[in-house]
Amino acid sequence: MAKFFLIIIQLFFLSCRTDEDNSRNNEILPERYIVYNNFPSKYVIPRNIEIWLPAGYDKMHSLPVLYMFDGQNIFHGRKSWMENKYNHGWQVDLTLDSLNRLGTIPKIIVVGIFNTGLGRYSEYLPNQPREQVSEQLKFADDWVKKSINASGGIKSDSLLMFIVKELKPYIDKNYKTKKDKEHTILAGSSMGGIISIYAICEYPDIFGKAACLSTHWPSLGGVFIQYLENNLPDPYSHKIYFDYGTKGLDKFYEPYQSKVDSIMISSGFEKNLNWLTKKFDGEDHNEDFWRKRFHYAMEFLFIKD
């Protein structure tokens, strides 16, 4: 395996963001970020991986791990990979710090899996159901065909193999993790939401929870929804969170999400117990809103943990 370029960055953030909190705990806490440039793989092209370790990590025994897609968007308030105006990122590190201080959720490790730009669509688009996907591709927009052809076909199965057979074993070996499915979580937005739900269906023994924000169900005419009818994981050992807004791309999602919700119910999932779908009126399809909603997903997935 090629040599990693490991960068350890010490960044400092104010431990609390409100005047009330600062008066109670006016200090600066160190947070650790570890970046692997061009993490190698035999399944997919190399990509950057960024890991966030919570405060006090060195004194802890083992922690749950959250794997997040579009990893370049989730920390530091950097500009999103699409170079659009929504340049604040998810800032999941700050949200998790706040939730930890409140005692709402346990401390967790976050692994950000960078996308590969133009190859993102081909890696996040599920291969299933194969016949219907192949048929729908004939009628897809030119940019979809161009993206998939440039990548040599749909690569989502290869991406999941990378995560399951290469990335997760490396993380489990080198960090203080709880390795079981109950403590292995996925999260993503838009196409990142699609690949998150696909992953938990394909590898239910590896992943126990998934947060799918603004899930882009309309991909290829919503064909992937058919796959869910017979492939959702066991509701008694898995938890899944969905949400959507009503503006931008999100304004198209409600009828698709309603179909998914019906499938969740018929598959034995119970709302507010092991599955939750939330609608956010007036919210759009970008990092600004996913940042605001991230805490709902985490609080639901970790309730009673």
Image (tube, rainbow, N blue to C red):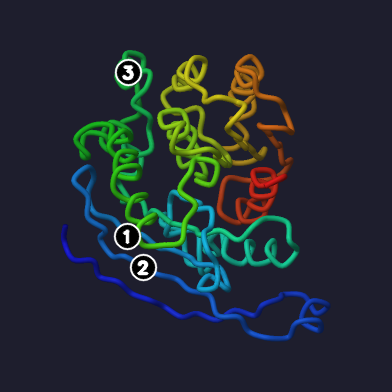
Q: Going from the N terminus, do you reach mark 2 or mark 3 first?
A: 2
The percent position of residue 272, horizontal first and vertical second, equals 74, 33
Residue type pointed to by label 3:
Arg
Q: Residue at x 60, y 51 (%)?
A: 290
Q: Is residue 251 left or right of residue 47?
A: right
Q: Classify 131 as above or below 46.
A: above
Q: CA distance from mark 3 to mark 1?
A: 29 Å
Whether residue 188 is visible here, answered yes or no, is no
Q: Residue at x 55, y 39 (%)?
A: 209
Along the line of sight, which residue is nearer the eye, 303 or 257? Answer: 303
Residue type pointed to by label 1:
Asn
Q: Residue at x 51, y 29 (%)?
A: 217
Q: Going from the N terminus, do you reach mark 3 or mark 1 first?
A: 1
Check disc 1 and report its element: helix, strand or loop: strand
Q: Residue at x 45, y 48 (%)?
A: 179
Residue type pointed to by label 2:
Val
